Amino acid sequence: MAQRSAAVEKLDQVAHVRAMRPIDLVHLAKQCLGDENLEYEILRLFDTTVKTYFGRLEMAASYDDLALNLHSIKGAASGVGAWTIAELAKGCEVEMQAGRPLTSERIADLGMAIEEVRSFIARMLSNEPA
């Protein structure tokens, strides 16, 4: 019986993770002290920033360039509450620091998470109050 409960609990956790928004809006609101206009401006800036740094990451040819762009993506994502992006970038950093190469699959995973967040931001900004 205990094993079934653990399995059900795991399913509940997976469902919770899937239900989460790509950006933690509560975290963002706290960072912006509840100023909705500031939240929208931060989202616009994050959208531009993450697009720029991911483009640079894709073009990076050296360890230092890869590390700098990953760290920038991780920091920006953490600031707005884009936890999936932050965790993926952190995972890439850890792998690189351990001497493992950054694979194209890992970069693609990060790119998919970024596109999901950018799409979410676009939807939010399209409903922005005037």
Image (cartoon, helix red, strand yellow):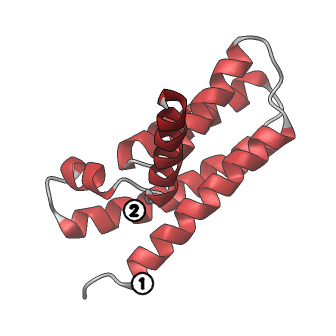
The residue closer to the viewer here, 14 or 33, is 14
Give residue 24's position: percent from left, percent from top: 36, 53
Circle 1 crowding by C-alpha within 10 Å: few under 14, some 14–19, many from 20: few
Q: Is residue 120 above or below residue 50?
A: below
Give residue 29's position: percent from left, percent from top: 22, 56
Q: Relative to 23, is 84 on the left or the right?
A: right
Residue 124: name its quadrant. bottom left
Q: Secondary structure at mark 1?
A: helix
At x 16% / y 63%, what residue is drawn? 35
Q: How many marks?
A: 2
Residue linked to disc 1: 126
CB of mark 2 within 8 Å of CB of mark 1? Answer: no
List the single residue furthest toward the bottom: 130
Residue 103: name its quadrant. top right
Q: Secondary structure at mark 2?
A: helix
Indicate which disc residue 70 carries: none
- Nearer the N terminus, badge 2 or badge 1? 2
Q: What quarter of the picture does the C terminus occupy?
A: bottom left
Circle 2 crowding by C-alpha within 10 Å: few under 14, some 14–19, many from 20: many
Q: Relative to 108, is 42 on the left or the right?
A: left
Indicate which disc residue 43 carries: 2
Amino acid type at image mark 1: Ser
At x 46% / y 48%, what residue is drawn? 12
At x 72% / y 31%, what residue is drawn? 66
Give residue 111's position: percent from left, percent from top: 70, 52
Amino acid type at image mark 2: Leu
Give residue 104's position: percent from left, percent from top: 85, 41
Q: Relative to 17, is 33 on the left or the right?
A: left
The residue closer to the viewer here, 29 or 47, is 29
